[in-house]
Image (cartoon, rainbow, N blue to C red):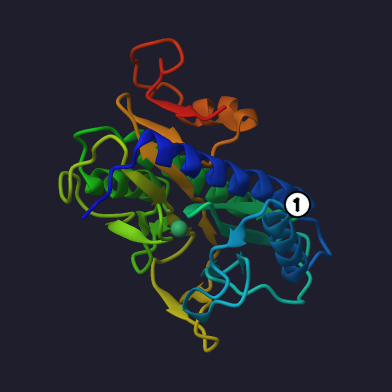
């Protein structure tokens, strides 16, 4: 069953997702050559607890940290470590938190210093693909429309979509129904309706789509050792389209650029666009 949240529940989801987005924004700003992913994790956990929230991933099926920090060919679920990031790396930072019974989840991939043109392109395409997926979210659309939009964009740019990990419903648990794949034909799966909350999270490889999990039981890497990127937003389906719960007001202009020419016209002034940030 897919839960449709009440306004009161959505307000709580807004609060925790905005918290996650704010912390993630601080984390991305401390990413410089020389910092370790353990440093990033320590800052993340401190900020989560200062806000009276709890890390969502720590202890989840035994996961040991507050963030997942996946470097270069690591796809997702990289465990923070004492290995310093170096100029030219890319690092995907994924963080979840729980506040007042509700979960937030968001991820970004960040360049470390100066990165290759291919890495820059991979980050751009992955974030764009996330926004293509988000743009397909509206009442009456089908869950698989999201993955179809993501895959179409990624493959048109010559990259590939990871199949083994998917996005998910989120609310009073970190992972709820439905699963949100990042590939496949449109027009399948449950129909979306107002109040459904989804974490959409494409993982995109520069090379082939295949991944494997390292012997630590968590870290997923590309089999061909190509670079991989991951962007994630949590959204709620609205009458107009959706609201991106993890979008900061300061990022709204950039989000609109990513959706350039693809914005769905709507009703009243505040909700005059199909996709909006909470402000
Ligand atoms: Co997620």
**Residue at the spot x=34%, y=15% of the render?**
266
Residue furthest to the right in view is 34
User: Residue 182 placed where, x, y %?
Assistant: 34, 54
Quarter location, residue 22: top right
> Split into 4 quadrants, where in the image is the C terminus?
top right
| Secondary element type, mark 1 | loop
Front residue of 250/123: it is: 250
- Say whether residue 100 is left or right of residue 271: right
Task: Tell me if residue 116 can be seen.
Answer: no
Q: Which residue is mark 1?
A: 114
Which of the four quarters of the rendered structure image does ligand 1 lie in? bottom left
Give coordinates of residue 132: x percent, y percent: 38, 38
Q: Quadrant of the N terminus?
A: bottom left
Residue 140, percent across and down? Answer: 19, 34
Question: For disc 1, does the CB lie below 8 Å from ligand 1?
Answer: no
Residue 173 vertical placement versus 262 (above, below): below
Which residue is at 36% across, 56% downward?
A: 168
Q: Is residue 120 visible?
A: yes
* Residue 127 percent coordinates (x, y): 50, 44
Vertical comparison of 167 with 224: above or below: above
In this rendered view, identify the residue nearer to me: 141 or 117: 141
Q: Is residue 262 left or right of residue 37?
A: left
Tell me what residue is drawn at x 51 percent, y 79 percent. Answer: 218
Tell me if mark 1 has few (under 14), some (14-19) or many (20+) residues whose alpha carbon lies within 10 angstroms of its own. Answer: some
Q: Nearer the viewer, residue 59 or 152?
A: 59
Residue name at image x 73 percent, y 47 percent: 26
Residue 86 relative to residue 164: left or right: right
Q: How many marks?
A: 1
């Amino acid at each position: 069953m897919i839960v449709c949240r009440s306004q009161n529940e959505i307000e709580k989801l807004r609060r925790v997702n905005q918290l996650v987005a704010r912390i993630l924004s601080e984390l991305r700003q401390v990413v410089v050559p020389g910092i370790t992913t353990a440093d990033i994790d320590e800052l993340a956990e401190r900020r989560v607890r200062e806000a009276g929230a709890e890390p969502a991933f720590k202890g989840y099926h035994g996961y040991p940290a507050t963030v997942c920090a996946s470097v270069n060919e690591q796809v997702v679920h990289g465990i923070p470590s004492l290995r310093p990031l170096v100029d030219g790396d890319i690092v995907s930072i994924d963080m979840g938190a729980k506040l007042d019974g509700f979960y937030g989840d968001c991820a970004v991939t960040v360049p470390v210093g100066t990165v290759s043109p291919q890495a820059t392109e991979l980050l751009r395409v992955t974030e764009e693909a996330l926004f293509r997926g988000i743009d397909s979210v509206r009442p009456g659309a089908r869950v698989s429309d999201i993955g179809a939009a993501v895959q179409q964009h990624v493959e048109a740019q010559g990259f590939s979509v990871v199949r083994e990990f998917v996005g998910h419903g989120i609310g009073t648990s970190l992972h709820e129904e439905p699963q949100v794949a990042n590939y496949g034909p449109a027009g399948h799966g449950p129909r979306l309706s107002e109040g459904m909350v989804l974490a959409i999270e494409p993982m995109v490889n520069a090379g082939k789509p295949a991944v494997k999990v390292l012997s630590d039981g968590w870290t997923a890497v590309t089999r061909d050792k190509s670079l991989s990127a991951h962007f994630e937003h949590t959204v709620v389906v609205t009458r107009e389209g959706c609201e991106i719960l993890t979008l900061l007001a300061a990022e709204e202009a950039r989000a609109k650029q990513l959706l350039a020419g693809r914005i769905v016209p709507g009703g009243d002034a505040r909700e005059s666009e199909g996709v909006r940030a909470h402000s």
